[in-house]
Image (cartoon, coloured by chain):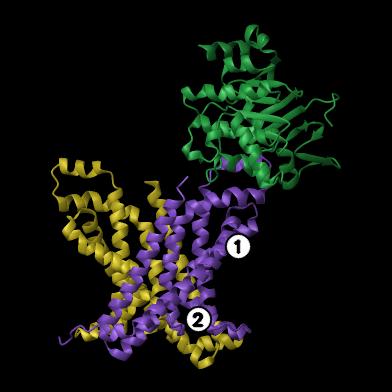
Chain colours: A purple, B green, C yellow
Amino acid sequence: MEYSLHFGAVWASFDKLLSGLAIGLGLAVVAVAIGTVLGLLAAFASVGPYRLLRWAAAFYVSLIRNLPLLVLVLLAYFALPQAGITLDKYQSFAGALALYSGAYLTEVFRAGLISVPKGVIEAARAIGLTRLQTNVSVVAPIMLRNALPSLGNTFIGMFKDSSIAAAIAVPELTFEARKINVDTFRVIETWTVASGLYIAACVVIAALLRGLERRFPKF
Amino acid sequence: MSDKQHPLLAIRGLKKQFGATEVLKGVDLDLNKGDVVSIIGSSGSGKTTLLRCVNLLEEYQGGEIALDGETIGYRSGDGRRRRLSDRELSRQRAMTGMVFQSFNLFPHLTAAGNVMLGLRKVLKLPKAEARAIAENWLARVGLAARADHYPSQLSGGQQQRVAIARALAMNPKLVLLDEVTSALDPELVQEVLNTVKGIADDGATLLIVTHEMRFARDVSSRVVFMEQGRIAEDGPPAQIFGAPKNARLAEFLRTTRH
Amino acid sequence: MQAFLDQLWIARWPLWEGLLLTIGSAAGSILFGTLLGVIVGVQLAYAPWWLRLPFRIYVDIMRGTPVLVLILAAYYIPAVAGLSLGPTQAGILALTLFAGAHIGELIRGSLQAIQPGQAEAGRSIGLTFPQLLAYVLLPQAVRSALPPWINTGVELIKGSSLLSIIGVGELLLKTQEVIGRNFMTIQFYVFAGILYLAINIALDQLGKAVERRVGQH
């Protein structure tokens, strides 16, 4: 085997990889932010008193979790224009990832909701808070704290899934890595560095999350 | 509003069932302003359920509860009774305070934050005023120094005293206390009972469910004995504990006193 | 609708082949991934630290790297190492390595959840470590890891769609090719979606049924 490692060609394009990493992180942040809203709505619906809303939430979760993200992305980017909705590649991907993360976050928040003690909810009702006030001021903060570790893991998962944006030519890390790979043929180096960047980002995010968890002690 | 025409709390023919089990079989009970009434009885006699009905945490199938002349929980018209809207129920719940066996403090809020939540969201008080009221009440239950502690940093007895401050700060017409010492370690019981005694002496109207017979005797103006979903005997503590008329009550007192 | 059905009839064989390749590559990688995962899980749970370390590194690399990066790396790297792998083989290799790490963690978790008394009881009747593993520990671990293992199957079916990016003719690539001919974009993506849903919901139900049965014991 005649292959010796030369990282020089990869380092020359390192700025591209870094900007790709930033794009991936940005897409994940936007998607998870929207997904958090979707997930909260669906989670409250899924434990609420209305059968139709419970059914709708269950349908959303089951539909999205059983579809490949790439199918959602291609639908958003290539099929929606046929229905008269044209999104650019960033919007299509962020939208698809938001919908996708929302389904996972529904389950995360649902577990968090179930973990809120019934007596604490009754205490809020007993001092005269309405159902909405109870949910906003008491249930949501407790649930969010309990859900924080899973929320963090979901974010890391979605950040990794931002690599799929390469399929519609969003210049994120995987897309840039593939370009460098094809341009330079430094195959092993390229994928080692790309993978290393993803892992490093995941480690940093995980460390930040652990810091956040320590700042808000568990109840 | 609160003239002497009607009692502060009037319970008439209250009936409640869980599925096929009838828990309350027609309960009548009156409390006047300033009364301190203890409900005693064996577990399963329906005393906690009665308290929860008064605070509208449970729905009930028959009878009526009036608080300061206002029928609460249900509206009856054209021959049917309907549960009131969430907003109405919340307004009525705010008129009564409830202290729970398991404290049920809000774990994400400090002691002061627990007391302030209802003041801010229900009574819509400005933050500074709510804070002042909270500090005042925490001082009255002896926890002025713990205002900024979280529940997890407080002992059980301290948590229960915060819960009492939380209920009293809303200036309720009536305070319901549901076995407030049952979840406490024995050495922490007395501090909570002393706190309750203090608010009773200040003239609060209290409806208490308790297993502490000595406390019931000391603090109450009246004691009610419940048995199988009905009130079996109702009288001053001296009568209930000194000369019980009801045979089941006499039996109950014998077994709980050892 | 009629136009779509006509096009669907024309495209039935490519789509059928794609569906088979989707199921085949997921099944292949879960099979190899399970063999790998059991080895990894046992090492992670019981090996001394110096032996555990390389397995730990392997698992963490696989779990920190996006599946698509694994697939692209498995597609491009073997060629320079003198191995010639077709896209399908490269894809199954990548999904196998991914599944091996996940299943390894599942098995490790299940093994470590077994009460220490089980191993002690096994040793006390004179079982060697491999016997202990084979007759006492792994049967219990496999039982509790079964429902999440089936869930890994759902992840692999979904992950196999990424093989379309390196030109593996599975369901999604075949769908794209069909769309390239008839431009019925929405209809055929939705149709592919329904096929994925059908497979995954069936797997999901199987997982729940197994979980109920496991829960009974």
Residue A88 at x, y percent in the picture: 55, 83
Q: Residue at x 14, y 46 (%)?
A: C127
Residue farthest top in this picture? B243
Q: Residue at x 18, y 56 (%)?
A: C49
A204 to B242, vertically: above or below: below
Is the same chain shared between marks 2 and 1?
A: yes
A76 to B125, vertically: above or below: below
Residue B94 appears in which quarter of the rendering? top right
Q: Within 10 angstroms of label 2, few (less than 14), some, or many (20 or more) residues?
A: many
Residue A183 at x, y percent in the picture: 32, 91
Instruction: From the image, tell me which residue sits under label 2.
Output: A74
State how far apart marks 2 and 1 are (Cα): 24 Å
Where disc 2 sits, the SS reads helix
Mark 1 belongs to which subunit? Answer: A
Classify the position of the N terminus of chain A by image quarter: bottom left
Where disc 1 sits, the SS reads helix
Mark 2 belongs to which subunit? Answer: A
A212 to B128, vertically: above or below: below
Residue B198 appears in which quarter of the rendering? top right
Left-right relation of B113 to C95: right
Q: Nearer the viewer, residue B59 or B196?
A: B196
- Please name the amino acid that badge 1 sits on: Ala
Point out which mark residue C123 bears. Answer: none
Instruction: From the image, tell me which residue sits under label 1.
Output: A56
Left-right relation of C136 to A167: left
Residue B71 at x, y percent in the picture: 80, 35
Q: Nearer the viewer, residue B210 or A142?
A: A142
